[in-house]
Image (cartoon, rainbow, N blue to C red):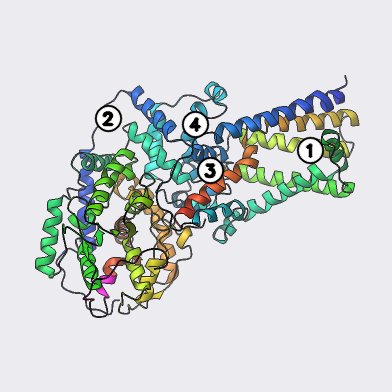
Amino acid sequence: MSSVAVPKRIFPTFDQVFQGFASQIGMLREMAPPPSLPETVRVRRAIDTLIAETNADEAVWLESCIRCGQCTNACHFFQATGETKYAPLRKMNLYRRVYQRELGPFRWWYRLVLSPIKLSDLEELQELVYDSCSECGRCTMVCPMGIDIASLVHHQRSALVAAELVPPELAALRMEQLHRGTVFGASAETLRRVVDTIREQAGIEIPLDRERAEVMVLSSAVDLVGNCQGLLATGKVMNHLGVDWTLCSDGFESANFGLLSGDMALWKKQVDPIVAAARRIGAKTLVIAECGHAYPALRWNPMLKGGDLPFEMMYMSEFLGRQAKAGRLKLTPIEGRITYHDPCKTGRRGGAFDEPRALLKAMDADFVEMPANREFNWCCGGGAGIFLLERATHLRDASFRIKMQQVDATGAETVVVSCASCRLNFESGRQKNHWGTRVESLVELVAEHLGDEPHTGRVMPIRGEAA
Amino acid sequence: MTLLDFARGPAIHWSLIIMATGTIWRLLGVLVLTRGADLSRPRDAFGNFKGYRTVFSRAWPSGEFTTATRYQTAMAYVFHLATLVVVIGIVPHIEFITRLTGASWPGLPNAAGVGAGVLALASLFALIARRVSKPAVYCSTWGDYLSWVLMAAPLVTGLMAFAHLGPRYETMLAIHILSAALLFAWFPFGKLMHAFWFVFSRAQSGVAYAHKGVRI
């Protein structure tokens, strides 16, 4: 339990937020666009996408599998169900077939012995690369060949975008972000409204559209149309630190349904205005909200030449963790045992391990690692958009039991997460299983435990690894 | 030309030519493809080089997976090491390599060679038994079984020839050499190529993760 009194809430609690989201997600299925292209065109487009996205890296990985089955030990969906179709090595099969027939060094032979890809093959693939793979990369940790199956799965998502086979919930949000630039209707107007509400009701100033600022902070749809507490907490912490910061109404959304669905063009389209806004205001640091996949979408975006950017990108936990490590963020102690769940996209596939732990240390927490932690952390089962898929509910629920066992093994009363998707999935699992463990967001926890007097002077962002 | 002459002559020579040509073709066919560029800024300027250690570190499973992988790791190590001892350690094989390349080294006593052969075969059976008993885990293809048969055949026929079992010695020896020829000829086309791929595959992933500051 927190040692600090919880202030009066002006926004719903997270379990109410979760209930609200669940009903919104239900509506998405009806909004999904039906396929419009002829079958042969859809198949051809999927194949062409895979051909275009296959470089030597992908080819080597596809060639390397010896079907030793070790990856099944690492996959939460296989371990939770025992169903062979969820074995990670099977998730490469269709890609390998396309590669062997179209690109591989023995393609003249494989064209004779392997049947061409049909639409039904792609329809079957949908469950394997969306519903039952959160691209968490745990299988790579055990593969004796070190195959990065998650990245191969991602290419297949791109192929299914081309084949108009994105699952309905992701398809609806992809179309919304593509055509209206919003997610769950979270527009610039919504952002302004939430900022006003936070100022009026909580007395916390969220700088919006300042012309110049050292730090540009992103928000996310989950924060704006559901858990506004996240943005409130961000404002509280940033102001406490005395950071010269702002949000920009023309580039505030962390969520990227281009990345989640596999639509590379939308991925880029969504990132460009954020980069432009950060350049315009002269930001030195871009802080990504607690939205796990936004980290690879921005910080590890392979299409964005990071070295040429005038600013550094970091995840919220990284930014705050560096402040804590530098002694600039003093936090009050937190009571009770705590464990931390590394979101796959910021942990194993992002490398932000130490900073969130530095924050918990700054709270003098009785912190206990889960049996499998950091690079070996088990995915909660909701990542890479899976939380949104109704059809994947049984898979999510089954694999979440592994996560609960991991948390329970620590004896922790609270599990801290730093990703809205993980948090929603934990909340779902908590409610379904009547689980007594508290689920907390890292930034909200920090906001509740701000210790010393607020800084009055300007705080320079802490840059680089040494920080 | 006797069967033994055929086996020792054209059969083994052509199989080696197929193996060398096929291996080079398959490696080049993949490695000439362009490399995708990751333009994002690495977490640590020189960190990417650390990724190459995955080529070596992945030779042993991490502690997290020790229990789950114990059986397979043990059997795979026994199989690979024992097979290596058999291939380069016993006198007739050294004589064959000497004829081909001129290089020579002292051989092992017969008992050690037979022991290694038996170990290699036993571990190979231990591996296939597990593969067959857990189809959900292994997702085997016909190529996996063919590779297994072609790998087991030279071990079985070699041990039979040494023990003077089966047909008369010359015929058994010819069969042994032919089985090895089949193995060589199959090498570039199936999963035995992992003998080369593992270096590239591990290095690529090691570097990709090291770029983000993650050690895999």
Task: State how far apart marks 2 and 4 are (Cα).
Answer: 25 Å
Q: Residue at x 31, y 32 (%)?
A: A164
Q: Where is mark 3, residue-wise? A: B136
Residue with the mark numbered 4:
A99
Q: Nearer the viewer, mark 2 or mark 3?
A: 2
Magenta span dominant secondary structure: loop
**Image spot of residue A294 (x, y percent):** 32, 52
Q: Chain of mark 2?
A: A
Q: Secondary structure under badge 2?
A: loop
> Which quadrant of the figure has residue A30?
top left
Above or below, comparing residue A386 to residue A334 in the picture: above
Q: Are marks 3 and 1 on the same chain?
A: yes
Q: Position of residue B69 (x, y in %)?
A: 60, 54
Disc 3 and disc 4 on one polypeptide chain: no
Amino acid, disc 1: Val
Q: Is residue A105 left or right of residue B174?
A: left
Name the spot of residue A73 as percent of width and height, x first. Answer: 52, 52
The verdict on residue A461 being magenta is yes
| Residue type marked 4 | Tyr
Front of the two marks 3 and 1:
1
Amino acid, disc 3: Ala
For the residues carrying marks 1 and 4, which lies nearer the camera in this image?
4
Q: CA distance from mark 3 to mark 4?
A: 24 Å
Dot 3 falls on a residue whose secondary structure is helix
For marks 3 and 1 on the same chain, the one whose residue lies earlier in the sequence: 3
- Secondary structure under badge 4? helix
Q: Is residue B100 left or right of residue A88?
A: right
- Would residue B20 be seen by someone viewing this image from the given angle? yes
Q: CA distance from mark 1 to mark 4?
A: 36 Å
Which is in the foreground here, disc 3 or disc 4? 4
Mark 2 on the same chain as mark 4: yes
Which residue in the protein does label 1 denote? B156
